Image: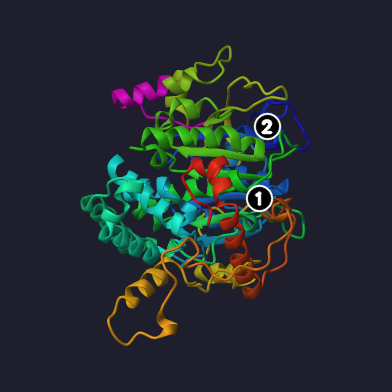
Amino acid sequence: MTASNDASILIAQHGTDNSTVQCRLLPDKANRHGLITGATGTGKTITLQTMAEGFSRLGVPVFMADIKGDLTGISQSGISTPKLAKILTERALPAPEFVAFPTTLWDVFGEQGHPVRATVSDLGPLLLARMLNLNDTQAGVLQLVFKIADDAGLLLLDMKDLRAMCQDVGDNASQYTTEYGNISAASIGAIQRGLMQIEAQGGEKFFGEPMLNIADFMQTDSKGQGMVNILAADKLMNSPRLYATFLLWMLSELFETLPEVGDLEKPKMVFFFDEAHLLFNDAPKVLLERIELVVRLVRSKGVGVYFVTQNPLDIPDTVLAQLGNRVQHALRAFTPRDQKAVKSAAETMRPKDGLDIGAAITELAVGEALVSFLDEKGRPSLTERVYVLPPSSQIGPITPAQRQALLADSLVAGVYEKVVDRDSAFEAIKGRTQTRQPAGTTAAQVPAQHTPTASLPDAPPAAPEKGIFDSIGDMLGGGTRRTRTSVGEQLARSAASSIGREVGRQIIRGVLGGIFGGSRR
């Protein structure tokens, strides 16, 4: 039983008024991460929605992926139904105060929400290799392609830049052998085929500018409620590697851009990673190690990460050990692996006298869970068998009309919708190709030679020492409500950010960029 605290988030309870057990999530322990597990149909989505509402009430922004398309109901006020009234009566739960929560909708494909983009350079070769399902040799060649582009000052912003760069490196592989190592045509071909597959799945829409400003996730409304950011992931789930890579990129963005803050009274943001098994399935050892590193260190940046999955065995032990807040819904022990999962889940939760955790896991009803949150001293509380409270917002998806209204009234409406295509690697390589034509070449058509600044735009006068890191700190200093950004401001900010990142590229690659291999262009 977790002690009552006005600032805590009531997630679940059980019993009568005379003997009530309540499970409350303490805000200052919420960035110690968490785990929500359970078989399909056992109530994980309701738990996720109830927790997201609790964080929003405290002014904590939330990000979560909408796998089944039914989390958008959090943007609308809930209503009482006979079914809900019956459940509340049977379980002696208090009736929720029906309210709506501020919501921003996002979509990699730009169809059901504001577009979300990243540059190829910002994603980096390690995450791209994971997305393209490359083997170690092919991933090594992709890293060489990034290194060659870096040394030549060629911007890798979108898919056509990376394709052009791969083709150029493949066509001129013999020129790079001495300095960079062997580059096989087979590996270049594998990378190009992987890029074609991503394009066929619509993944090229994820790459380009304007790139997502992670600060746009960290908003509050006029009432001080945290913004609930919902990523439409029903279509994205058709490309599970793209889905996992995208969420991991966002987590690394939070890690690399947010300042060190230590333990706060409440998190700066909470990140729910649904279908978490996709992140770890067939992931190479180097990626698993870096995921573990980010999860361990992002806590000190004030970010809480909550993994949502069907089976606790989906999470590697090194990551599982860092998840202090647990909500365990029912598991089905139909197979030996299921029985192992039940045993594993029971052994990792703090026992309570009179409660057989192993037996209870297979007996839990829908909406019922075993809960153990961290207490005031950071220790796992005794495991309680309780009922998750129903959410205050609508259960189920919103209508197309409601979706359009949310998009029109959003703080970032019009900021990300228009694609920006700056001169980058594709244009530079195309320009060099044109100079090789024997006739019809004019001075205006002759680009600079293959030098480290060949494709970069004219840089502005050097800024004072304050620059890249102080600017990031000023931009992400808090979760205050921002006014709607104009398209012109966004484009200017994107250009300035790219210049700043180029200046600090080598520093960040050495200090933080090495975590996921991104060059932070």
Mark 1 crowdedness (10 Å alpha carbons): few <14, some 14-19, many ≥20: many
Left or right: 34 as drawn, with respect to 153: right
Find the distance from the CA under tag 2 to the CA under tag 1: 16 Å
**Position of residue 511 measured from the top left corner of the image (x, y, whole percent):** 57, 40
**Position of residue 211 measured from the top left corner of the image (x, y, whole percent):** 54, 62
Q: Quadrant of residue 227?
A: bottom right
Q: Is residue 330 magenta?
A: yes
Q: What element carries label 2?
A: helix
Left or right: 103 as drawn, with respect to 69: right
**Which one is nearer the viewer's eye here, 389 or 270?**
270
Quickly name the residue at label 1.
61
Residue 227 appears in the figure: yes
Mark 2 crowdedness (10 Å alpha carbons): few <14, some 14-19, many ≥20: many
Kind of residue at disc 2: Lys
Q: What element carries label 1?
A: loop
Which residues are drawn in magenta? 328-343
**Which one is nearer the viewer's eye here, 440 or 23?**
440
**Position of residue 368 measured from the top left corner of the image (x, y, whole percent):** 52, 33
Quickly name the residue at label 2.
29
Please tell me which residue is depicted at 44% across the width and 83% down the height of the picture: 444
Please tell me which residue is depicted at 29% across the width and 54% down the height of the picture: 191
Kind of residue at disc 1: Pro
Q: Do the residues labelled 2 and 1 touch (CB within 8 Å)?
A: no
Task: Give the vertical position of 359 relative to 413 (above or below).
Answer: above
Left or right: 180 as drawn, with respect to 60: left
Q: Quadrant of residue 30?
A: top right
Residue 133 appears in the figure: no
